Image (spheres, coloured by chain):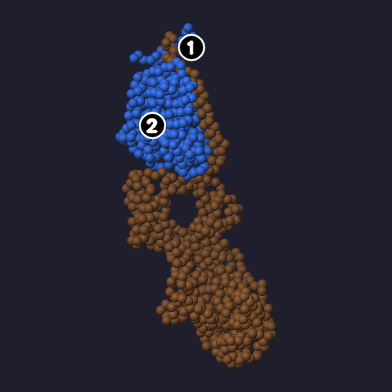
Chain colours: A brown, B blue
Amino acid sequence: MTVLVSREGATEFRKRFKYFAAGVLLAFLVVLGRLFELQAVQGADYAAIAHDNIVRRVAVPTIRGAIRDAQGHVIASSRPASNVTVVPGRAMPSAVSGRRPSSVAEQADTWSKLAITLRMNPEERVRFETRLKTACENSSWQDSPEDRRRSPCWRTLLVREDIARDIEAQLKEHASELTGADVMTVPVRYYPYKTLGAHLLGYVGEVDAETLAKLRPQGYDQMNVEQRQKLNPLNYDVGDALGATGIERAWESSLRGQAGWEKRVVDAHGRYRTGPEADRLLDDPKRQDPIPGRDLRLTIDMELMQSIERAMRAHAAGAAVVVDVRTGRVLAAYSKPDFDPNDLSGAGGKTRVRETFARLSTDPLRPMMDKTMSGAFQPGSTFKPFSALAALEDKLIDPEDHERCDGYLMFGRRIFHCTHVHGKVNMHDAIAESCNVYFFKLAETVGMDRIARIANDFGLGEKTGLGTNPEAPGRVPTRSWYALRYQGQFRIGFTLNAAIGQGDALVTPLQLALAYGALANGGTVYSPEIVRAVETSDGAVVQEFPPRVRPHKVDVKPENLARVVDALRAVVNDPRGTAYPVRDPTIDMAGKTGTAQTGYIPQKGDDAKRTAYYSRDHAWFAAFAPAKAPEIAVVVFIEHGGSGPTQAAPIAIQIIREYQRLAAARGPHVKPPPPPPPRLTWFPNVLPPIVTPPQDDAGAPAFSLDDAEAPFLTTEAGAM
Amino acid sequence: MISRSSTFTARRLLDSPRDQFDWALFLVTAGLAVIGVVNLYSATSVVRASLSDLYVQQVYWLVAGGILGALAAAIDYRHIERYGYAIYGFGVVLLLLVFVLGRDIRGSSRWIQIGSFSLQPSEFMKLFLIVALAKYLHNDPKTEGRKLRDLAIPALFAALPVALVLRQPDLGTALILLLIFATIGAMMRIQWRSLATLAVFLGVSGPLVWGYLLKPYQKQRVVSFLSPEENLLGANWHAHHARVAIGSGKWLGEGFMRGTQNQFLFLPDQYTDFPFPVFAEDWGFVGSLVLVGLYAFLVLWGIRVAQSSRDRFGAVLAMGASALIFWHVFFNLGMVTGMLPVVGVTLPLFSYGGSSVITVMIGLGLLMNVSIRRYQLAPGR
């Protein structure tokens, strides 16, 4: 029996078993302890991580506000553009190495079909084919999901931006044969008037890396809401649109709106999951609606702008400004040459933006510059009324006294020229006939600083504060300025030149328009205003801006002002006036011509044409109308346009005529603006109606390169 | 001399093995298998169409494994002892065949294709190694402590398959083979001096192995285990998401097939090496407690079977089978909970895979074999 129960030498192991059991028990207790830690102790933390993994806040885009002119015409809005993207591995499965899984085993490349549908030229097609193949170079069908996440082979690649509607229709029709291709809709800024008003509107660009790095510095994602709000109040992210210049930039915070968000359930591959099972996992709040951008109502009159464009057709470069002398509202601000903000705002894609920039930045006529306020130029004789006022105010000259003009004035050993031999002229005649000699003598008596004080009172030499584009302050030189500039060697010749708006005096067309507005309205210099109201998308006014008067009111005696204004009327209405030959007898207006010498020194490499263009004078005409009860001030500036009376004055007269025609057509009362167009929902499948500005049928011939008088217009890079 | 208990024992000796059927072992195994299949359903059915019938496949494997396990239990283990070295030799040949016929999957070749089945010989090798070691110890009883010299042959038994498996390369299986050998080695009585020498040897060879034998991806796993927060998207992706899934189960879990990290595909390898996070996410700590309890019971029961074995062969066999289960469970759970580096070790009866399921079922069959014959005389030779 003992044989039966003995355990055949198993005694060697006997004592060990309880240690084994203890070890196993301990090991499992450690495992359980760890599980307790993970699940019971830290469970809530991990549940939060798990929740973050599957719930993603997806931005709900907002719509940038529209911009309308005074009459309610939409001049900037957003339209949907369609971009085509491709997932290389799906559109070109042959580029991926390895044995194909059964799901794609039979699939042919769809890329060639897409290339044909997009009407790619052979060169473009080859370029993209290379890119697709490069993207999938290191990819294999056997890659793990994480490898795939990292490989460019499975990420979307942009192939074509802003495709035409018919191509989009074809793509949608053949969607089943175009595996891997997708059409994405993105908002693109749309300017129906194209180039007209480009400078004042500006354009919209994608927020650049440098700005973004400032708005979203490192660690931004970890910051709390307040810190983010402080750094990046408008919440910019990669790819967002940002106003680059003009009103688009200055009013960015109103126009932008605020993107909303929506919580979506995503899986590890970034795919959205829907249905009740997924919705159950979303916590409250589930959504925040976007706040649409505010609309802007401008003081600009686009019909008047069109008239100005027509009137300026014969000239290559210049600017025109129309302000309401009763309010300081800017009715028109036109700068030439211009550009199409559509091309810079993403219509036609990034390539077109790049090309347009390249073209514009090498153009010697500086099309990107807003010459109404960013450019300051010698005002020429349009400055004379202010010199005259300075003399009158300080009673240094009797305006009825006559001076003799022999066509020149010898001052020391220098000769100062006049335009003609005017004979004996008093102040009235000197302004009307633009006699320089009279003003040389006046300047000698009055002195530079008194003239500068009056000019400053009228807002010259100082930024107007419109703020839509970088403003040039201009310059009204004083003795102390010259003292600094020429190290104490003040010469009386400086004063003489300054009195007639030559030499170192510089003004912007906008400044001059506001100054003439003050001459017209009895001495009130307004701060210019270009945005009349901020409105909601359905037209309700959020904020209205009343006219603002500059804190500095001009302190001149009414009789002195009246005397100067009377002389300005004579410029147009007196047969001896400089603008009399081009006057329109039906229009009651006053103004002053100006022909400013630019003192161009020919540079190396200039050809004759270039020298001829740049040596020409700037042509000016500053006016207001009607002379009896002034409503508007108009400044026309033609860069290297030649003579003010013959070149600029007719344009100003044309603008005033058009203004009066438009006012008459609109009736005595301001017509209520038309109801705003129906709002774009995000995004309808139709384009907003394209508003084509009416084409002019008559008028001056368009400026042309073949014109013998045409200025130098080569586009050598860096020529200017 | 015959006590009450020995009469009781004596009466049992007359029973057939069928009367001694180990219900506890059977029921725990069946329970784990059922939970494993249910969990596999949760892990795969909603993921992808191609994977959704994986759990059916697993049932087939379990049935096949059950039949083979029953066979392993039915044949008296003392017959198996007789062919121990032959079986071991067969296993080594299969491992060698892998190098000839192996298919390369994700950078290592572990499988032999037979018809439409893929066989993973290294899985079965674990059993064959146990059998060989059991036979060696059975035939070499010692009354006093063993010296290093006495350990040389069993060490060679282990070293050969470990070397072959490392060549595939398959770190997880090599590790399990080594641990099985170490466990069985720990059953033996070894002289203190020999143990000290062994410790010194391991201390010296460890760095050498690290420097020359491990592949870069294997080192990467260890390094990433030691600094888990550094590279979440890289080597720690698996470990991180496994922890998140387990933790988010909290006390009671999110419910069957409702674990978000699994359902939304954040768990990689959720049906092979990482089925436990799926389970823990669905059933919470309470579920984990039950599951770990079942595994613990199974292993402890195995040790009890080894203890009650009639002979040395049976004891080592039962101990080896228990060690197989224990190390798989411990390493897999340690790995998914972030206590151990990520090495590919399956969770018995939970991970999908024919070779793994059949190996475990045969192992448990052998355990049953030893268990039901603990009162039986060796069959006549």
Percent position of residue A233, x then y: 58, 57
Disc 2 element: helix
Residue B319 found in image quarter: top left
The residue drawn where x is 53% and y is 34% is A35
Residue A668 found in image quarter: bottom right
Amino acid type, label 2: Ala
Residue B69 found in image quarter: top left
From the viewer's perspective, is A316 left or right of A139? right
From the viewer's perspective, is B206 left or right of A513? left
Q: Is residue A94 among what the camera can see? A: yes
Is A14 above or below relative to A335?
above
Q: Is residue B371 among what the camera can see? A: no
Nearer to the camera, B348 or A370: A370
Amino acid type, label 1: Ser
Q: What quarter of the picture does the N terminus of chain A occupy?
A: top left
Disc 1 element: helix
Percent position of residue A482, x then y: 62, 77
Q: CA distance from mark 2 to mark 1?
A: 48 Å
The residue drawn where x is 46% and y is 72% is A719
The residue drawn where x is 56% and y is 41% is A45
Is B132 above or below relative to B106?
above
Q: Circle 2 is placed at which residue position?
A: B163
From the viewer's perspective, is B14 left or right of A58? left
Residue B5 disc label: 1
From the viewer's perspective, is B351 left or right of A643? left
